[in-house]
Image (spheres, helix red, strand yellow):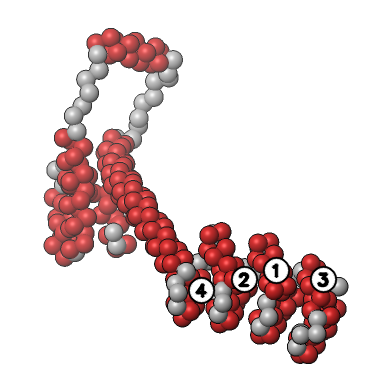
Amino acid sequence: MKKQNEHILPLIPDYLEGNLGKEQKKTVETYLENDKDFALELEEYRSLFTAFKNEPRQTPSKKLRQGFLKMLEEEKQHQVNVIDLNPKSVGSNNRIWGILKVAASVALLLSAFLLGQYAEKNTLNHDVLSLEQKNVQLKQTTMIALLENQSASKRIQGVQYIEDFTAPDTTIVNALIDRLLQDENTNVRLSAMIALSGFRDSETVKNAFIRALKTEKDPSIQIAIIQNLVQIQEKRAIKPMQDLLEQEETQPFIKEEITNALPKII
């Protein structure tokens, strides 16, 4: 409710129950005519009060009523009589009771709304999560199928699917490692190596790089593997690098790369 209408709030319960005087009733109705938002809010309160009035009341059993009256009588005997000297207190108490009813109505409405929102959000989150899981499964199946395709270009396309996985499972990682170690096409092996470099902190990937360094003959892939092993300071790579230095068929620029890399690991 707008701030300029806040002073009308205490009048709502009495207005709805027909307890206002002429002047106060006229004040409320003036606001109703000039403020559509206020009129809508009052109708919401009316609906809530109607719901309260129509709520079936449970009638206590005779035994429960007798027990209550007995407890009430005992409590009254322990209380000091108090005389209210303020004749306005009765009307004030009614007003306070009216405000409390409004507050209770608003609380009830808000609680129902929040419960509905919570249930709807949980259902939506569950549906979104289920959809995301199915999407990931579909991408994984597609990626594996492409990696096993006879066409090198399709296998490279399959490797590129790794971009859709922030945390690929062992099935995907092992499929990429297989392409790195076994694929007959140099471009496919290089693509697989680049894809795996994003997960080079994994022990499985580290082991794959060391194995590839022992068997790979393509210079561009050899350099890429060496650079990745240096980045992660993998000391197990020292021995295969030294072996490459001793092999005659190793390209001079590869030996130079190894010579520069070894001090960074040792």
Q: Earlier in the sequence, mark 3 or mark 1?
A: 1
Q: Earlier in the sequence, mark 3 or mark 4?
A: 4
What amino acid type is highlighted by mark number 1?
Answer: Arg
Depth check, front residue: 95 or 142: 142
User: Which residue does the image show at 25% across and 17% down from the upper left?
Assistant: 60
Q: Nearer the viewer, mark 4 or mark 1?
A: 1
Numbered circles on residues, count = 4
Mark 1: secondary structure: helix
Give the residue number, with chain letter if any, for mark 4.
159
Question: Could you tell me residue 169's position as x and y percent?
Answer: 54, 59
- State the separation of the CA atoms marked 2 and 4: 14 Å
Q: Could one spot residue 93 in this view of the protein?
A: yes
What amino acid type is highlighted by mark number 4?
Answer: Val
Q: Earlier in the sequence, mark 2 or mark 1?
A: 2
Q: Which mark is residue 256?
A: none
What amino acid type is highlighted by mark number 2?
Answer: Leu
Question: Could you tell me residue 44's position as x and y percent?
Answer: 20, 51
User: Which residue does the image show at 18% across and 57% down from the upper left?
Assistant: 40
User: Which residue does the image show at 17% across and 63% down from the upper left?
Assistant: 36
- State the separation of the CA atoms marked 4 and 1: 20 Å
Q: Looking at the image, do the residues carrying marks 2 and 4 touch, with CB atoms under 8 Å apart?
A: no
- State the separation of the CA atoms marked 3 and 2: 19 Å
What amino acid type is highlighted by mark number 3?
Answer: Lys
- State the separation of the CA atoms marked 3 and 4: 29 Å
Q: Could one spot residue 231 in this view of the protein?
A: no
Give the residue number, with chain letter if any, for mark 3.
239
Give the residue number, with chain letter if any, for mark 1.
211
Depth check, front residue: 207 or 76: 207
Mark 4: secondary structure: helix
Mark 3: secondary structure: helix
Give the quadrant of residue 58. Answer: top left
Q: Is residue 242 above or below residue 94?
A: below
